[in-house]
Image (spheres, rainbow, N blue to C red):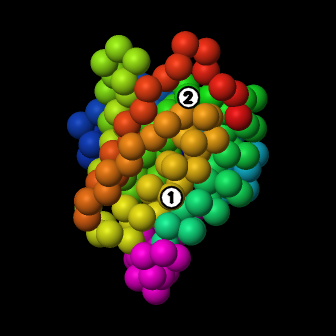
Amino acid sequence: MDEALEKMAKDSGQSVNALAERALRRLVEWDRLVEKTGLVMISPVTLGKLMQSQTLEQARALGVSTATDVWKPMILSYYGKADTSSVLESIELLARYIGRFDFNYATEGPKKVVTVRHSRGAKWSAFYAGAAETLFSSLGLDLQITETEELVSIEFETPGAEKEA
């Protein structure tokens, strides 16, 4: 293992300590969640073919179903609650470890804007929009969702006392 770590460090231009820290972070943030919730990895090619076979409406319904049956239970399992903060942190974890989209979050006073950029087309936007609408509207938030071929933007205001899901 030492030889493999040294080679990886040399090939990547990082220190062994940086690689070890990244591996430990992944173990704590992601691997234990995957084990606990039964998530599985799937190749991007296979996933792309599966999405191509969906209509726009089916892709959106799949997003709703994924949020309801997979992501919300994952959030509850990991954080013990589903609130704005835990939903945002979970989307960030999904972006970091699944790597199929970029996540950005901005705030200006009570107004929040979440952006999921993916560059995979309208069906993926419909999927992410359906999932986001399901997760955020379950918090009692009034949403404004914008979809393009490459991104989904979710705008909302957080009330003074956040409603728990």
> Mark 2 sits on what residue?
84
Where residue 22 appears, as percent x and y from the top left, is 45, 33
Residue 65 falls left or right of residue 158: right
Mark 1: give few (<14), some (14-19) or many (20+) Cα within 10 Å.
Answer: many
* Residue 55 position (above or below residue 82): below
Point 50% across, 48% down: residue: 132
Residue 33 is drawn in which quadrant?
top right
State the residue at coordinates (55%, 13%): 160
Q: Magenta segment: does it hold 108?
A: no
Q: At which x and y percent is residue 9?
A: 33, 38
Residue pictured at 52% horizontal, 76% vertical: 58
Is residue 20 visible in the rendered structure shown here?
Answer: no
Residue type (three-letter) at the residue carrying disc 2: Thr
Q: How many marks?
A: 2
| Amino acid type, mark 1 | Gly
75 or 149: nearer the eye? 149
What x and y, as percent, mark residue 88?
50, 33
Q: Which region is colored magenta?
A: 40-58
Q: Is residue 163 left or right of residue 130?
A: right
Q: Check if residue 41 falls in the magenta segment.
A: yes
Q: Depth check: 46 or 165 in front?
A: 165
Quadrant of the rendered image containing residue 165: top right
Q: Main secondary structure of the magenta part?
A: helix
> In what element is the residue under mark 2?
helix
Visible residue check, residue 58: yes
Whole-Å distance between the Cαs marked 1 and 2?
A: 17 Å
Query: Circle 1 sits on which residue?
Result: 130
Mark 1, secondary structure of its residue: helix
